[in-house]
Amino acid sequence: MESPFILQMQGIVKTFPGVIALNNVNLDVKRGTIHSICGENGAGKSTLMKVISGVYPHGSYSGDMIVNGQKVAFKNIKESENAGIVIIHQELTMIPELSITENIFMGNEIVKHGLIDWNEARRRTSELLKLVGLTDSPDTLIKYLGVGKQQLVEIAKALSKNVSLLILDEPTSALNEDDSANLLKLMLDLKSKGITCIMISHKLNEVAAVSDAITVIRDGETIENYEVEAGHVDENRIIKAMVGRSIENRYPTHESKIGEVVFEVSDWQVEDPRVPGRMLCKNSSFTVRAGEIVGFAGLMGAGRTELMRSIFGRSMGIYQGGTIKLRGKEVKLDTVQKAISNGVAYVPEDRKVLGLNLLDSIKKTIVSANLDAIKTKKLLDFNKEYAAATHYRQSIGIKAASVNAGVTSLSGGNQQKVVLGKWLFTEPDVLILDEPTRGIDIGAKYEIYKLIHELADQGKAVILVSSELPELLGMSDRIYTIFEGTITGEIDAKEANQEKLMKMMTVTAS
């Protein structure tokens, strides 16, 4: 008789030097369901998924793993894939310079008479793309796809391997609301076809919408493990289990103290370097006052990040016109160094690619954007470096054994805090935060929200770019909307709601 469980984990213990990552974790996943795993950053979720998928081989952990009623001992990823288990990591693994077809069948090539059969590969790719709802050509290079489409290509690649258990690690963390909704619908479609999904997510509304069962992990231990009816999930119960306490309000209460205009951008125009004549930013104008948090809303590809990066030292696109004023005085921020020296800081949306050097320690990262501040007689003073890093580790709550720890050893939330610390060390007047809570759990988000409020209370002008409309509504004083590179509207956050913002985000400026 076939087991009702496609996967069972019993008493899983996984340790690293000086750290118990998983401590007697138990997990039962029923066949043909969507099973969500929730927990704070660093709780052990991704470690558990790496055990399941063979990234951590049998022997490197203790406890039993049972697949389809049989004990298994995967030595590598290939063995887990042969058993029908495929994991899609939070950080996408697509190679930008290769086509969709080449990415899907990399390492799993279709061979005929000793040669790769590209015609058959393209045909199968077309079928797989239809399954995930994409109409792009199989020959399209990955670099020309948005993050949402890349995520769907990852799922198409998993489906090419005859997957029966699909693990998705934060699948919607980089997606806007429409792309997230499409992905959740696809998961439900896969479930209807008999494919079981394990989803790791910090977005509790998504967990509530699709989950048949939920497991909560905290500090490497299983806290709760229960079945639910999709659409009838108690989010507060999950939060309490995740963080060990109730969070009554997702966004801290805050009374804004708004002063004079600090930052003003007028008629900003930037051209796409890849497509001559195509504008990334069109006549964009906005202001930010001291102590004010100004949100920017827009669908994926609307031009939010392009606008912010082009402002920050013209680090994206080809400048075609426009002015920037700081406290009423026009400034020319045509390099990143000039932007920094004029008190402008930018926390990028992709912390691992643009925000961090993954080979560096916490202390080297925090001081990296303002080395002049740790010099003594023109030489770097490592005592000052250590003191500065220790100050930010304590003041913004970076959880690490010491500031000598490598940034790769940190959870996503703590990596984001290190990036914030790096830019706070430059003592900016204007702080641009591009998706500052992407891929971060509810507890860490709350801490970052409080930090943003503290920065505003210090008189800093804060720009908040987010794909999560509730976050913008909960944190912003004013909100601008962007569509196809153009700012289409401005609204006081107290007068805004998701419906109004969505309408402003999907129409051209009047």
Image (cartoon, rainbow, N blue to C red):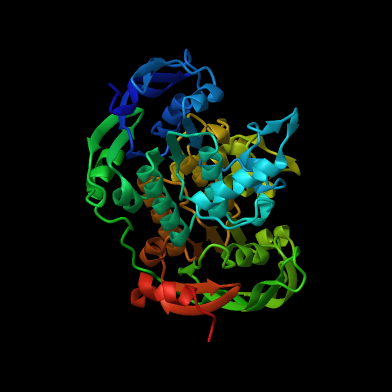
Q: Give whichever of 374, 497 is nearer the camera.
A: 497
**Residue 378: image x %, image y %?**
76, 44
Residue visible at 43% across and 50% down in the picture: 186
Res 484 → quadrant: bottom right
173 lies above or below 433: above
Residue pushed farthest top?
59
Q: Is residue 403 above or below residue 447?
A: above
The image quadrant of residue 469 is: bottom left
Residue in the image at 54% along x and 58% along y:
434
Q: Going 22% across and 46% down the picture, which residue do you hit?
A: 229
| Furthest-bottom residue in this view | 510
The picture quadrant where one finds residue 224 is top left
| Total numbered circles | 0
Against 84, is 16 above or below? above
Q: Is residue 356 visible?
A: no
Would residue 288 be found to the left or right of residue 184 on screen?
right
On the image, the x and y values in percent for residue 389 come to 55, 40
Rendering coords of residue 337 (x, y %): 72, 58
Please tell me which residue lies in front, 191 or 414: 191
Front-lying residue, 295 or 507? 507
Residue 21 visible in the shown view: yes
Of 161 and 211, nearer the camera is 161
**Residue at image coords 61%, 62%:** 344
Give the percent coordinates (x, y) of residue 315: 70, 60
Q: Residue furthest front?
A: 113
Q: Quadrant of the N terminus?
A: top left
Q: Is residue 300 above or below residue 34?
A: below
